[in-house]
Each structure stands twice: as structure tokens, then as C-alpha cells.
Amino acid sequence: MNALRSLIFYIGYVLAIILSFLTLVPVALCLPLKMRFKALNLYNRFIIFWLRLVCGIRYTIEMPEPLPEGPCVLLSNHQSEWETIYLQLLKPPVCTVLKKELLRVPVFGWALRLLEPIPLDRSKPSSALKQVFREGAQRLQDGLSILIFPEGTRVPPGARKRFNKSGVHIACRAGVPVIPIAHNAGEYWPSRTWIKSPGRLTLVVGPAIPTKGRTPDEVAAYVEGWIEDQLRRISDVPRPDAAEEAARIGV
């Protein structure tokens, strides 16, 4: 049954991409950057709705404090495609740091370009880091928030990967707050199979972390620790033993 539901979901998923390209993209081309997000995010809203309707995947948001008014840097763990879709809706307009290969995907990538993400070439880490700092500072100055997945790739539930500090460096340089985000979406929308499982995932949005007067290392350590603590609390899949995993990844 889950396989059948997932198949129906992907039929709607593909049709939504094509329909969005034919309707939303032409409209977005005529709009200023910040207004494009409202238009193109209609696609994101539909996918979240379609996923709930067909696959039975719902979500609960825990957010003890409202998000800050101005631009900020959002740092989230990365388990599935769900968060890449939903987090675009959390604090628009938001610029996403992503691998440049995504911009080459027909239709989807063309629409993604309109949101002016920061595409990185992972084969050139040094130049990619400079690009993140340069373009990230510009996006914040333009009033956009930045979404970064510091693990750099999707990490399955129950695994752990060292966090990249580039997002924290951008925030500290610009003096904007960091918003830590944790979720267990990979338990319902796995990255290594197309079959989805019904259930209710949890997304936890932490309080804004001030960066003024704090070092990137200090902020990064807090963010990673906070996300890991939340994952231990909300995940059905056991997290790695703290001591052994810290030794393995060199924390």
C-alpha cells in the first residue's frame, strides 16, 4: 500500500512541476525577487498538501519563540527532500545554499534559478567557501535569509556527520542571528528509497542565537549540540552513542 501511495504521490509531484513551469514561472519572471518567492512557493505548499493527502505524512512544528523580523541564517539537519521543500515556507524570502548540479535539472532547476540560490561546486571546496561568504553576505544585505544544511548532504536517521561552519561564519560576519532547526523527516520520506511511510514527523525551530560578540566556533558548537539533543528527543531511530560518535567524527 505504501508503494502504491508513493507512486501516486510522484505522479502528482511530476505534474505539479510541469504545471508550475507553465504557470508560476512565467508570472515569477515578471516579479521582483522577493515577490517571486510568494509565487513559486505555491508549488511547495501543494507538495506538502499532496504528501499529506496521498502518503499520510503530517507534521508538528515546535517553535517556542517567533522568528526574528530581519534576515537570519537558518541551519538545519538534512535527512530527506521534505525539509528542502518545507523550509522554503518557514521564513521567506530565503536563499538556499545548494549543489550547482540541481540548477541543471530540467524544469525544476530552471525555476530554482529565479530564486537566486547560492550554487556550489563541491569539487572546488576552497573557491566554494569564498563564494558562500561573498554571496551570502550580499543576500543578507539584500534582506534575504539564508538556509544552509551544514552536513552538506543527506544523512540517514541514526547517523551523524560533522557540521560545516560556513553558515555560522556568514552569520557572525554579518552580525545576524542563527536559527537552529532539527527534524526527523527522513523517517517518513527516506532519501534512499522512493517509498514513503505514513506518520507524523516533528520539526523543532530553536530560539534565535545572537552572534554579535561571539566566535564562530562557539556558535557552531552550540548549534550542533542543540540539533543533536533535539534529534535524540524526537527520533524513533536511535542516535549514535555520543562518545563513540564524537571520537569517530573528530568532535
Image (spheres, rainbow, N blue to C red):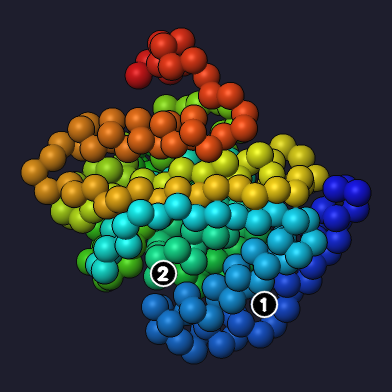
Circle nearer the N terminus (2, 1): 1
Task: Name the residue type under label 2.
Answer: Pro
Query: In 3D space, how far apart are the residues under numbered discs 2 and 1 (Cα atoms)?
Result: 19 Å
Q: Is residue 141 left or right of residue 24?
A: left
Circle 1 residue: 20
Q: Is residue 205 left or right of residue 85?
A: left
The secondary structure type at the circle numbered 2 is loop
Q: Is residue 79 left or right of residue 106?
A: left
Q: Residues within 10 Å of mark 1 (few under 14, many from 20)?
A: many
Residue 169 badge? none
Question: Residue 151: horizontal and vertical position, in percent?
Answer: 46, 36
Quadrant of the frame with the C terminus: top left
Q: Nearer the viewer, residue 174 or 118?
A: 174
**Residue depicted at 76% across the width and 45% down the height:** 197
**Nearest to viewer (mark 2 / mark 1):** 2
Circle 2 residue: 92
Question: Residue 132: horizontal and vertical position, in percent?
Answer: 33, 50
Whether residue 100 can be seen here: no
Q: Is residue 68 above or below residue 189?
A: below
**Residue depicted at 56% across the width and 87% down the height:** 27
Q: Residues within 10 Å of mark 2 (few under 14, many from 20)?
A: some
